Image (cartoon, coloured by chain):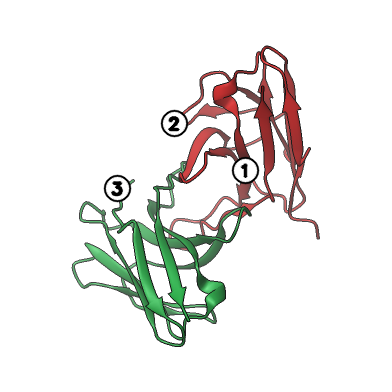
Chain colours: A green, B red
């Protein structure tokens, strides 16, 4: 599974879009990009995933570059409740391990 | 529908004691995982299972053993607890997916906080 790299922390103003980047330059053609977040001390919560097309659901949007070497998770109108750690993972359907890196700590500022 | 249930939620052990953490899922998932999370750190995979009767090592397996005798249960054992095993332990499960579905979505339990004195 490809290694992913994320900035350790980011700030965002409340009500504005939060754009969280993820680098996965060694991603292979059949590896999906998954995003999770972990609120307080709970287990991580699934947000969204994609292969090569941009994806949107009720929580967020995922933009994947054409060469698939990087992606951006977009929270369109960040709220204070979105302040937490976000994890980006690359994995194919044959993969058995889900490896979580340190993630990005997003701080939404009032 | 309970999802993934971990027991106990909290436990304090003395060095050298043994204990077992239980993870139970009611979603008929094939894959189950045990992670540990230390303060300020990401999750690290301890062991995982791809089906009943099978287990495999993750990133940090030393000091832990696991068993998957029933599909719905995944047990994590500490034979001789050490202070370095003080952590929050998370269990997760997911279904086996088809090649093109991309639905490798993990469902996590609420965590078990273990302190080893």
- Are the residues under marks 3 and 2 on the same chain? no
The residue at 43%/46% (across/down) is: A94
Mark 2 secondary-structure assignment: loop
The residue at 67%/30% (across/down) is: B115
Q: Position of residue A73 (x, y in %)?
A: 38, 72
Q: Position of residue B81 (x, y in %)?
A: 64, 18
Q: Chain of mark 2?
A: B
A14 sits to left or right of B86: left
Q: In the rendered image of this protein, does residue B83 appear above or below residue A82?
A: above
Quarter location, residue A63: bottom left
B96 sits to left or right of A65: right
How crowded pointer 1 is (Cα within 10 Å; few <14, some 14-19, many 20+) is rated as many
Q: Chain of mark 3?
A: A
- Residues A61 and A96: in front is A61
Distance Cα–Cα, label 3 vs label 2: 14 Å
Q: Badge 2 is on which residue?
A: B59
């Amino acid at each position: 599974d490809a290694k992913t790299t994320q900035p350790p922390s980011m700030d965002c103003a409340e009500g504005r879009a939060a754009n969280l980047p993820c680098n996965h330059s060694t991603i292979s053609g059949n590896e999906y990009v998954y995003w999770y977040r972990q609120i307080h001390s709970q287990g991580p919560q699934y947000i969204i995933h994609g292969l090569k097309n941009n994806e949107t659901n009720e929580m967020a949007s995922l933009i994947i570059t054409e060469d698939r070497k990087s992606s951006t998770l977009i929270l369109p109108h960040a709220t204070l409740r979105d302040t937490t750690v976000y994890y980006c993972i690359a994995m194919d359907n044959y993969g058995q391990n889900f490896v979580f890196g340190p993630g990005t700590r997003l701080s939404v500022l009032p | 529908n309970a999802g993934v249930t971990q027991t106990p939620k909290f436990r304090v052990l003395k060095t050298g004691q043994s204990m077992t953490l239980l993870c139970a899922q009611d979603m008929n998932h094939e894959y189950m995982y045990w992670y540990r999370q230390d303060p300020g750190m990401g999750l690290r995979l301890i062991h995982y299972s791809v089906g009943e009767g099978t287990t495999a090592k993750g990133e940090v397996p030393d000091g832990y053993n696991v068993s998957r005798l029933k599909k719905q249960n995944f047990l994590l054992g500490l034979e001789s607890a050490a202070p370095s095993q003080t952590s929050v332990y998370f269990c997760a499960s997911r279904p086996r997916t088809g090649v093109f579905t991309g639905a490798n979505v993990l469902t996590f339990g609420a965590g078990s906080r273990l302190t080893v004195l």
